[in-house]
Image: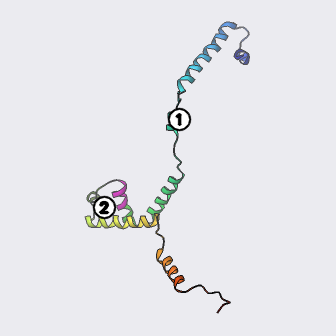
């Protein structure tokens, strides 16, 4: 069947037997190559190791982090990147920036607080509590009843 499908490649003046053996030889090497690439995975452990988790959430969080970093002041962004991203100590970061140690610590602290607010803003509970307290103080009245 394979020879029939490749009949267009046969040269009329060539011998048939070597041409057929060439087809068989090519098929043999193709099968060996396929077997080498095929992994026997009866229990599915290898296939499970090939899966990867979804990146969508991570990419969204990463872009939000980059946007939040852009809103920081230049000094705050530099301080937080030196200490948190590159892993320098406060002393080493202060030497890089040419500022006192206390200044570096306060810059990093302010930048952390700003990033925390930008990335995970707290629920404004004071307004909610105030609104609940107002409802409890005055019962709801229907406009037609007096």
- Residue 108, horizontal then vertical, whole percent: 34, 64
Q: Residue at x 46, y 59 (%)?
A: 65
- Circle 2: element type: helix
* Predominant SS of the magenta segment: helix
Q: Position of residue 39 (x, y in %)?
A: 53, 28
Q: Which mark is residue 97?
A: 2
- Residue 129 picture location, percent across and down: 48, 78
Is there a contact, CB below 8 Å, between mark 1 and mark 2?
no
Q: Earlier in the sequence, mark 1 or mark 2?
A: 1
Q: Position of residue 94 (x, y in %)?
A: 28, 61
x 44%, y 67%: residue: 117
Between 145 and 20, the one nearer to me in the picture: 145
Magenta residue span:
79-87
Q: Which residue is mark 1?
A: 47
Disc 2 residue crowd, few under 14, some 14–19, many 20+, Cα 10 Å? some
Q: Residue at x 37, y 55 (%)?
A: 85
Q: Label 1's element?
A: helix
Apparent side of residue 112 relative to residue 128 in the rendered image (left or right): left
């Amino acid at each position: 069947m394979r020879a029939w499908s490749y009949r267009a490649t046969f040269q009329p003046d060539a011998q048939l037997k070597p041409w057929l053996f060439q087809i068989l030889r090519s098929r043999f090497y193709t099968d060996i190559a396929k077997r080498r690439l095929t992994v026997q995975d009866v229990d599915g452990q290898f296939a499970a190791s090939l899966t990867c988790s979804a990146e969508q959430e991570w990419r969204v969080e990463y872009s939000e982090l980059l946007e939040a970093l852009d809103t920081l002041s230049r000094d705050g962004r530099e301080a937080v990147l030196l200490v948190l991203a590159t892993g320098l100590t406060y002393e080493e970061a202060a030497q890089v920036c040419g500022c006192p140690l206390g200044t570096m610590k306060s810059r990093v602290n302010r930048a952390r607080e700003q990033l925390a607010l930008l990335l995970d803003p707290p629920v404004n509970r004071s307004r909610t509590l105030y609104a609940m307290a107002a409802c409890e103080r005055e019962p709801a009245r229907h406009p037609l009843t007096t």
